[in-house]
Amino acid sequence: MRSLPLDVRKYAIVVLSLLSTTHAQSVAEGTFYKGGGAPGAAPYQLVDDYQPSIFFSKFNFYSSYDPTYVTKDVAWQNGYVQEGDQAVMSVDTTNKWPRGGDGRPATRIISNNAYTHGLFILDLEHMPWGCGTWPAYWLLGPDWATNGEIDIIEGVNTGMSNSISMHTEAGCTIAGSGQTATFQTSDCDHNANGNSGCGSLLDGSKIPNNYGEGLNNNGGGVYATEWTSEYIKHWFFPRESIADNIASGEPDPATWGIPTVNAQGSCDIDSNFNNMSIIINTDFCGAWAGWVYQSQFPECPQNMSANSLDSCVDFVGNNPSYFEEAYWEINSLQVYQMPEVAQPSASYTTSLSSITPAVSTAGTSQLPVGPGASTQDVSSAPYTGPTSSGTPTGSAPASASTPVLCPDYNGTAFTDSNNVQYEIHCGFDYQGGGNVYAAESFENCLGICDNISGCKAVSFVGGNGAGSCYVKDATGSLNYDGSTNAAFKSVTDTVPLLNLTQHP
């Protein structure tokens, strides 16, 4: 999902091996996580944790061409983003923005880290909803649409049904069977069917409270997306029905039953989906919300002397207080992966012969149009308008200049800013009891340990960016898992033993 100019806006357990982690192609401090793609080949392990208290430090703020998207500084100064027990991302609810101007300020964030394969679990309490809104939570690869687009949450205006779709180059189609959502279109080619992509509709009358007001009034829910080499499946769990193994941190899609959406068919997943970033944004009007504003949402205030798009723009621009419900409230976002070399059990088959195509409702699709153009094709118009008069939540956190401990200091001693020396072990998890804290970086995790009585070591999940710091108060062993980074104080009484039995 992107908003564009008006004419386009459109798991066998196996020996664990190192998950590929290299710098992402677009963000200097980002990490690329490549997990195993064989379905059911190994248990999923947590590789990245977007804790609410450090949520936005793991994203960059996109403001390159859509004039309504603001920079990090503007977002923080005007209270559009807030961190704490939940991560909140809202829009301007103070000023009027008449048609022809910049448009109502909003935020679009793109993860610093990128992924190939994985299990993405979003727990949200609230999402933007209402006339003129076009919110989205999605995955996007570089060089659109060569590396794919996966739209996980997307809808418009006062709709009560989520749309899940994918966009690729030619040659990828899905069957649409083995799912609970209503299958709509099979061809993922962005050049076909007006770039509606391939996907399904989560009909709110059949899958209640999956989107918008229904989801918000029900206390939100969980969207889980499993991306393997053979399929991309999605599950929606309303608040009262979230799988126990999600809450326990040991998610197992094999226990979740029929997926809400089963994107599988005549499509080489690994050729079409790679190196994807997480994106969350709120847009207004545009090629979907705007063009169907009058025809499908007559309950929204209308300017009947204007066309549908302008009618939408007029309402959005002139009614700031209405958009107090246009916010994301996120409890957690976690990414799990299997080891990259994990292989399926002998009983598993990837044959597509058993996949019976479902009846498509092509021609009556309610799926959104995709982006339709690369960012290079769109003229730059960064936000330059006035800022909100709302209460600021403070300045944007300063970007910390920290050393890349992994892999640069792997197997060596590192002295932190408090003059405490640690031995660094990249790709290892230090076994021991203790608590978990949000940390801005691996080095920050060491600083947390410095200030906690009894802390002897840490394990850090988050690559070279922000993440989760597991403080250890007991000695144990270093176990290789390929994705966690560990450190222990050089002055500890008992030096941990390396457990290399799982090392490749």
Image (cartoon, rainbow, N blue to C red):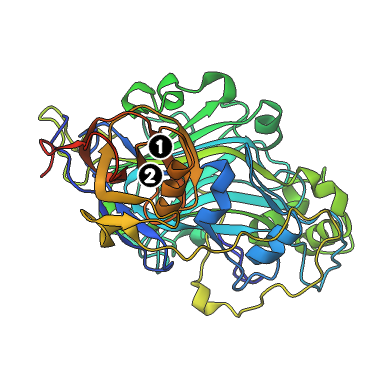
Q: Is residue 306 left or right of residue 382?
A: right
493 shown above or below 90: above
User: Which of the two residues, 107 or 501, is positioned nearer the viewer here?
Assistant: 501
Which image quarter is the C terminus in? top left
**Residue 335 numbered tag:** none
Q: Nearer the viewer, mark 1 or mark 2?
A: 1
Residue type at tag 2: Val
Q: Is residue 267 visible?
A: no
Q: Residue at x 19, y 38 (%)?
A: 350
Say whether disc 1 or disc 2 marks the residue closer to the N-terminus: 2
Q: Is residue 71 left or right of residue 178?
A: right
**Location of mark 2 (residue):** 461
Q: Are marks 1 and 2 in contact (CB under 8 Å)?
A: yes
Comparing 58 with 139, the one in front is 58
Give the secondary structure at mark 1: strand
Q: Position of residue 268 (x, y in %)?
A: 26, 52
Residue in the picture at 40% in, 22% down? 245
Task: Determine if residue 210 is in view.
Answer: yes
Quarter location, residue 98: bottom right
Identified by mark 1, the residue type is: Tyr
Residue carrying label 1:
470
The percent position of residue 134, horizontal first and vertical second, equals 66, 52
Residue 103 on image: x %, y %: 77, 66
The quarter in which the N terminus is drawn is bottom right
Q: Residues within 10 Å of mark 2 (few under 14, many from 20)?
A: many
How many marks can you see? 2
How far is disc 1 from disc 2 in space, using C-alphas? 8 Å
Q: Quadrant of residue 86?
A: top right
Residue 495, position in %: x, y?
A: 21, 38
- The residue at the point 66 percent across, 27 percent down is 219
| Residue for point 70% across, 46% down | 327
